[in-house]
Image (cartoon, rainbow, N blue to C red):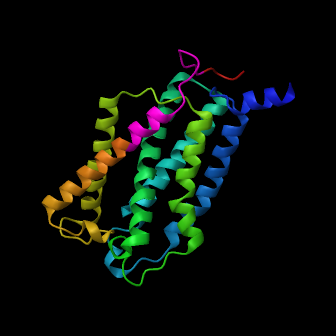
Amino acid sequence: MAQKSLSTRFFSKKAGNPFALSLAWVFIIQGIHTLSYLQGMPLPPYLLKGGHHQFLTNISYVITWVYFISSALYHLVGGNSLGHIKEYLSAIALSAEFIVVSVYWSMRLFVPTLIVQKGQIVPLDLDLLIHVMPFASLVIDYFFFCERWNIGASTGLAVMLGFAFAYWKWLEHLIGLDGVYPYPFLNVPVPQRAVIFAVVGLCAYGAFLLFKYIHPASTKSSRVHKKIN
């Protein structure tokens, strides 16, 4: 009976799940250290103009960190509005981190010159912290502690394409129209760059659909965001 009770609490999708809250706190605390470390990392001269906020890895990490803050708040105080904010942040963060993991590791293993500048070395522990841990944490959180996203396909498409476009414009704001992009494969003429960002947005949308539809459907017909007394 005790084991059943523990299992029920672990897989609970409602606010107040202590296991989901623990995961959120671990990522939040670790995230403070990781973000501080990233901010202090020296950049090569050609990347100084854009600074540390030009990297999709760093931006996705911040989104994931904010998501886990919203998750901690949700499991502490509950609330329907907070639950919906958490849901959208989860969809954006997990889709973005899927792009980071799939693009980074495929290029790092097979065509490293397209993702890492020549002579650039990323320590293995940092590599795992920013290119594995966020995605793994989000996957655990989503499949064990969250309801399946209640976000429509058309809304998801708009959000993911909007995210890709916003990232492009953010880069242009940081480095200028003729600046050096942080990833070598983006240093191409504008038409090709537009195609790349469109493909990235569509891949993020594909990840959104994938994670939405492989998530086990809730046994309840309605979602509940109850305030914890």
**Picture quarter containing residue 210?**
top left
Point 41% across, 84% down: residue:
119
Q: Residue 135 at x, y = what percent?
A: 52, 51
What residue is rendered at 51% in x and 48% in y? 64
- Position of residue 200 in the picture relative to residue 119 (left or right): left
- Quadrant assignment for the C terminus: top right
Residue drawn at (60%, 32%), measured in percent from left and top?
A: 74
Highlighted magenta segment, given as a residue range: 207-225
> Taking 28 as reference, is 47 above or below it?
below
Q: Please tell me in which quadrant of the rendered image residue 5 appears.
A: top right
Foreground residue among 178 and 142 = 142
Q: Nearer the viewer, residue 14 or 171?
A: 14
Quadrant position of the N terminus in the picture:
top right
Q: Would residue 224 be found to the left or right of residue 60 on screen?
A: right
Would residue 216 be counted in the magenta stretch? yes
Looking at this rendering, what residue extends furthest in the right direction?
Answer: 2
Percent across and percent down for residue 189 are 14, 66
Q: Is residue 58 magenta?
A: no
Q: Residue at x 45, y 34 (%)?
A: 212
What percent of the width, then of the height, locates residue 35? Answer: 54, 61
Image mark count: 0
Image coordinates of residue 112 in percent, x first then y, are: 38, 74
